[in-house]
Image: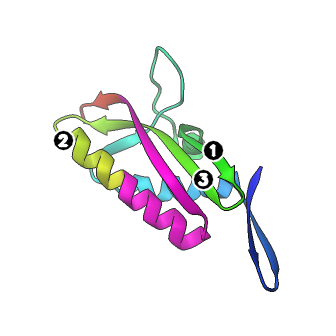
Amino acid sequence: MSSILNNELGYIEINKHVLSQLTYKAAIESYGLVGFSSKTKGIVELLKVENATKGVNIVELDDAEIDIEIFVILQYGINITTVANNLIERIKYTVETYSGVKVNSVTVSVQGIRVK
């Protein structure tokens, strides 16, 4: 699956993996984020950089609009709401700016807290 953008010269197809990578790059720069985790029930595993896009779920609503869900582990001692709101704003801005795909919503699922 991929997002398709049309213009007067033709169309641009953007793969979901590219959108996942944009989401990862935007989020990893945020203060308070330790890393991404996999979408599992039970044991939470901190994903390595090469597998980090597994902690990102892209849902296509139509050809030019998506929902993003991320599964993260945050640092102990920070305000979870503030970090989550910063993640939402940064991800939405980055994905829309670099890809041109409209982001309908960003859902942040905090899977755990880690003491550094």
Please, is residue 115 above or below residue 87 in the view? above
Whether residue 36 is in magenta: the answer is: no
Which of 20/28 is in front?
Answer: 20
Residues in magenta, as a range: 88-111
Q: Which mark is residue 59?
A: 1
The quadrant where residue 18 appears? bottom right
Q: Residue at x 27, y 47 (%)?
A: 83
**Between marks 2 and 3, how big is the CA–CA gap?**
27 Å
Tags 1 and 3 in contact by the CB under 8 Å rule? yes
Q: Residues within 10 Å of mark 3 (few under 14, many from 20)?
A: some
- Residue located farthest toward the bottom when viewing the structure as drawn: 9
Residue 3 appears in the picture as rendered: yes
**Which label belongs to residue 79?**
2
User: In which quadrant of the rendered view does residue 90 lie?
Assistant: bottom left
Which amino acid is tagged 2? Asn
Q: Residue at x 60, y 53 (%)?
A: 66
Q: Identify which residue is drawn at 79% across, 85% down.
A: 8
Q: Secondary structure at mark 1?
A: strand
Q: Quadrant of the C terminus?
A: top left
Residue at 59% from the left image edge and 38% from the top image edge? 54
* Residue identified by numbered label 3: 66
Which callout, 1 or 3, points at the residue further toward the start of the chain?
1
> What is the residue that sits farthest to the right in this orientation?
10
Q: Is residue 8 left or right of residue 103?
A: right
Confirm or deny contact between disc 1 and disc 2 (CB under 8 A).
no
> Can residue 32 be seen at all in this image of the molecule?
no
Say what amino acid the circle numbered 3 marks.
Answer: Ile
Tag in front: 2 or 3: 3
Cα distance, mark 1 to mark 2? 28 Å
The one of 10 and 55 positioned closer to us in this rendering? 10
